Amino acid sequence: MSSSSVEDIPEQIKDLFTQDGVLLKACLGRPVTDLNAIGMLCIVQNTDGTKCIEWRPNDLITIDSDTQDHEWAVVNTIGRRQRTLSGNLTADYATAKARIIKIPLEDLKTFRVTRNNQQMQFSTKPGVWQTTFYFQHGNAEIFVAYLKNHVKSAKTRHDRNTYMVVEPNIESQVLNKSFAELDIFTENTTDVVWNLVSNFKQRPYETTLEAFSKLTDIVYYGNEATNGKRDVSEEVAELLTKSMSAMDEATTVTRNDEYEVISVKPTLPPRPCIPRGTPLSTEKWDALKDTQGRITEVDGVKQLIFRGGVAHSIRQSVWKYLLDYHPWTMTHAEIRAHQKRKTEEYFSMKLQWRSMTDGQESRFSEYRDRKSLVEKDVNRTDRTHPFFAGDNNPNLVVLQDILMTYVMYNFDLGYVQGMSDILAPILLLLNNEVDSFWCFVGFMDKIVSNFDMDQAGMKNQLLQLQQLLTFASPDLAQHLAQKDSGNMYFCFRWLLVWYKREFSHRDIFRLLQVRFLLSALQSNLLGKQLGFKDNTAEGIYHQIVSAPHLNDQIRVILGHQPLNISTSTQSDDDPVEPSTSQVNGEKSILGQDVDEVMYTRVCRKVTPNILT
Amino acid sequence: MAKTYDYLFKLLLIGDSGVGKTSILFRFSEDAFNISFISTIGIDFKIRTIDLDGKKVKLQIWDTAGQERFRTITTAYYRGSMGIMLVYDVTNEKSFENIKNWIRNIEENASADVEKMILGNKCDLDAKRQVSKERGEQLAVEYQIKFVETSAKDSLNVEFAFYTLARDIKAKMEKKQEASNPPGGRSGVQLKANEQNRKPTSWLARCSVL
């Protein structure tokens, strides 16, 4: 990357700053053939003193690249630049002026830096990013720094990467900008104040002078009006007070080469405390049924279970309802008949594979493949648990029979690794082959997208998880990205089998129970602000939902309707998968908040990339 | 802070479900064996630092799920791997036949110069054997990949396999380093190659002075 300030060109157009290796990624009204051309991004001054951002394609400024090999051409472009600027510029302009992009600085409304500081977008009209540039070498930092010398800009409140151009002539606008938004410092104001405080301890004299000179700048630069001054000083005073009192609390101090950076990054509002309800007792469960055994207040029951769980003694019974084996509105008699039918259905499917001869099997490779996978996995499912431990354990036979029958029930899906993990706690709880099978079917219906052949469901969840993490904890998200773990693949197992591998059986019963209900209650949750597995999870949910910078992308992941206001954090470059906009279904993830909580609890299991 | 190792090698274990990838890794990293392992879902890893010719080599070994369904996730780890172990089960003909598919997978997803090794695991189960050692060797010759039969259960050749793979990677890496950073007294042929490489660079240097 090469960048320099050229100030002594006697042409009509003066280059104030140039940056090579900038790709044109998007530009409204330009033919596609112009896109992805490499060029030079400049800040130029016209003869009349007005300035503009200008992008020139490289082929305007290279001359003899054709005779050179590829490597050469690139080198030449950079080497030529100085000469071009001081001499041949006007001739080139005349021939290919049409391809140059000019954005007058007086028209510039907003700009933003995305993609690891490598992409810059400009807008002269609210709501539309007209031009997008990609910085091939290095990043846009230097360009932004120079641009800031020519336009007064302020980071927007909701997105640190987006800058509003503050028009200096409109006083009221400046007055309305808060101290923080003026962005005088390279870091945000809070950081500067923190630096001041921390440096003060070590070198009080210099720090004080430095800080006061900066404060003077702000007052001078920001506004000369008296109320502007007062606002600034008040705000600084407040920040200082806060920082002093918080100094010894939970702040992270990292030592840089030259100075200390104390990061205080409040990303979410405080977490509300949400009490957990009491478990549903046997008496209450019985009382919920009418004389015939019907449960009419289904939503109410679900909410009770969701908020407080159930007594373990009735879990067996409750799970048959939660897993859609027993319909809520059936009477005792109807359930008995229903169970009889389901039992017959089960055994007829079981007979289908049980009656298969060796000859049949030898000519049925798809069946054989599924069977072999089942056999392998049954022998390694929860074998440390007493229920499945030891040689010739009959429970393993039941486990295998149910999985094999499921293969016949849904041959296309067949057997996917992870299914035995899902069945094991059900069988352990119900200890009945037929009941376990149908509850397993109900479970699989909820979780089936996790087992898509193309893994689309899993990928979507991982993407949503990443987006939520970026929202709730940008630092951690960035750290993961730096460690090549931004794909969140290390969460794959957690999501695939709903944390079954990460918890004891006792805990997993509770966790699964909540997840069974998440999708069912989702619509109600939105209206009635219902809770999650425990107060922490629900607390996090509320934190995210009430965060001031909540955008549509996150709103959709949480199962809310988007507001359809195009926020600056959402762009055409950061597409939201169409499927994420489903408000129902397992994939749309109120549950992801539970995942977040679990994430912190299971955090010890991270990728080695993070460890090193 | 002093580094605790000289090199970090990323290795990958692939092969059909149930051939013993996790067992091999567990034997190597913990020197233990358990008949009732759990299946690997998605991807997992273990780390062991070994000593190779006086250098501390940290092996970061990725263990993958064997089932086809998880291929999209597991192939993401091919690219960064410097060495890949292809594992089959000598008591399972199908897993041996599939080695060819796994090799194709490597060709499609891993970097071209990745070191490979074929392991025929469970060689302790001679009574159930379906794939002879000779067939394994023949396949290895065909693809010009090193081959060894292992038993994670009896701790046979597991150490050997990882050390061999690591040593091959180290040799390849050091050779590359020397090529890009040549010390004095190189052979004539290599010098020539280097000179050719340098030509445009020197042109570049002169140009930017202008």
Image (cartoon, rainbow, N blue to C red):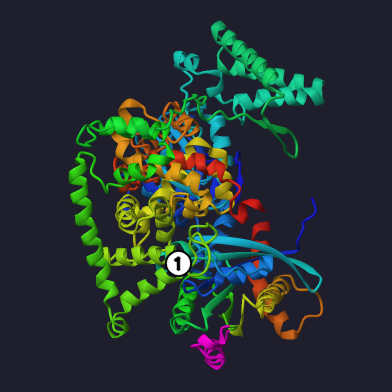
Q: Residue A326: give x, y in percent of width and height.
A: 25, 46
Give SS at disc 1: helix
Q: Residue A17: give x, y in percent of width and height.
A: 56, 40
Q: Which amino acid does label 1 sit on?
A: Asp
**Chain ID, mark 1:** A
Quadrant of residue B29 in the image? Answer: bottom right
Question: Which residue occupies the foreground of this view, B208 or A186?
Answer: A186
Quadrant of residue A528 in the image? Answer: top left
Quadrant of residue B209 in the image? Answer: bottom right
Q: Residue at x 49, y 20 (%)?
A: A168
Q: Which residue is drawn at 27% across and 67% down?
A: A350
Q: Check the image and report above or below for A190 versus A532.
A: above
Q: In this view, does A606 lie to the left or right of A127?
A: right
Write the start and end of the magenta stretch as one range. B125-145
- Whether residue A55 is visible here, answered yes or no, is no
Question: Which residue occupies the foreground of this view, A191 or A12?
Answer: A191
Q: Is residue A185 left or right of residue A419?
A: right
Q: Mark 1: few, some, or many residues within 10 Å (few <14, many ≥20)? A: many
Q: Mark 1 points at which residue?
A: A377
Q: Check the image and report above or below for A149 versus A413.
A: above
Question: Which residue occupies the foreground of this view, A521 or A16?
Answer: A521
Q: Residue A575: give x, y in percent of width and height.
A: 37, 46
Task: Specify whether residue B166 is painted magenta.
Answer: no
